[in-house]
Amino acid sequence: MEFKKINKFKEKNIPRYFLIIGLFVGTIMTLVMPIFNEPDARYHLAVSGKIVGINIDVSTYGETNISSGMKKQKEPYENGLDVVLKKYYFTKVKTTNYENLPRNIDYRYDYVFWGHIVPAIGVWIGYHVYSSLGVIIIFARLISMLFVIISMYFIIKRLKVGRLLFSAVTLSPVIINQSASLSYDATSYVITSYFLMLAINAIYERKFTKSTGKELIISTILIALFAKRNFYLLILLIPALILYCDNEIVFLNKIKEKVIKLWNWICSLRNSMKVLLGMGILTLAFALFTVMSMSYGGPIHVIMRMIRTFIFNNGGDGRDPSMGLLVAPYQEFNFVPKWEYGIWMVMMALILLSEMKFVNKISMSIFALLIFALNLFGVYYGFLSFDGATTGAISGAQGRYFTPMIPILLIFFGYDKFKLKINKNKYFMIGVFAIAVFSNFHLIFTTIYGLIKQ
């Protein structure tokens, strides 16, 4: 019987297993993690409450301001479950005017507003079920988690390639913790995954259909509304898809033909002209980088800070940003050991090597890698002045800012001339899901244990 169950663990069934495991670990994370399971949880609660007109005065629960951190929850969790229930679940909230909240809330009609729509619905439901902080947050987390897991189930089900990779990234402790929270990052992750699914499917089929075009337009609008600005880089994939695929849309074929003619003309130039053209492009790029970096000390200073940050993996604030990529969203509060990060990195590499080779042009693969790299540098560029730039490294950037872009690496590793490949058998897939389940439960344990003992 057990052998038959294992035998059914096939790639076509990955979406089903993802849904079951995602709902299971997501529900446990929703119910068991501390009330404020991330440093900015009070901020996300304030914005979500503002959307539905429920402005909660957190001072009722000993939170004197809407600050960053989790340590103020130490006492009730240290004193046992009955104290936690009495303080957070049985004590009803007091509401106040938005203007009286003890922090100037960053409330803008971009991803800050739209990204909090889903948890805001949960806040409204929880408030009307029983208006205690614990019940409100549990419902907000639950609605957010269901939205992410169910949305990703349909996205993964539609994927032609990369189902295991998308499943593993979504089931990573970082994404599950985001899903079981009030953060806008959860919505941002779903939107970027939807866009990447469309792009990967188009590359696999080598067709740019009218349906694909319509969905890419919709997903681009969704990225503009719901996603953080660094994910706008994904939109650069659209012209690459037009050039790579056979187009059903006539005017796109005409654009493609003109671009090909231009490229053929460049290729026909003498070598000296090609060198001059290349030098001109590099000079223009460096001039642009110089202008952008002048307010941060100039290009050399910026490059040196990035080298220190990347080479020495130094966030400048004592944190290891790489830990936040998949295993520990907030390492200073989660206390996840580095060996677990190592396991996930090896597993991600093996998954990428096990997926189907579906890209037949090296230019497409390199372009995808370039977008991934630009996102990496773009995020760190945005944090050059963070915290007054008091260190030689770049502070503030967290690994979870890059997690949604991991699936784009599938396009790079999917180049069909890239011969290094491993077999994706049922035992490998079972191992991936087992590691995901273990890591999520381990995150819950280390977070609560760390909160009590720190």
Image (cartoon, grey):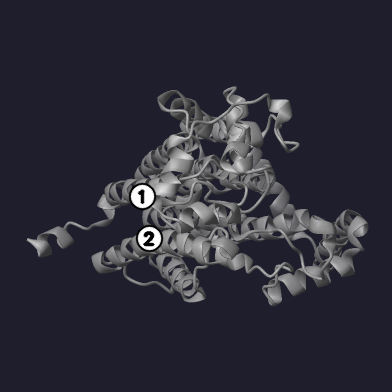
Q: Are marks 1 and 2 in contact (CB under 8 Å)?
A: yes
Q: Of callouts 1 and 2, which one flags the residue occurring earlier in the amino acid sequence?
A: 1
Q: Disc 2 on helix, strand or loop?
A: helix
Q: Which residue is mark 2?
A: 441
**Relative to 266, 331 lies left or right:** left
**Relative to 114, 90 lies left or right:** left
Q: Is residue 389 above or below residue 115?
A: below
Q: Position of residue 84 (x, y in %)?
A: 44, 47
Q: Position of residue 350 (x, y in %)?
A: 41, 70
Q: Is residue 68 above or below residue 144?
A: below
Label 1 is placed on what type of residue?
Ile
**Separation (CA) of disc 1 from disc 2:** 8 Å
Q: Disc 1 on helix, strand or loop?
A: helix
Is 15 in front, or is 382? 382
Is 372 in front, or is 342? 342
Residue 253 appears in the rendering: no
Is 266 in front, or is 13? 13
Q: Quadrant of the C terminus?
A: bottom right
Number of other residues with Cα within 10 Å of mark 2, as a class: few under 14, some 14 to 19, many 20 or more: some
Q: Position of residue 22 (x, y in %)?
A: 35, 49
Residue pictured at 49% horizontal, 73% vertical: 337
Q: Which residue is mark 1?
A: 28
Residue pictured at 86% horizontal, 61% vertical: 286
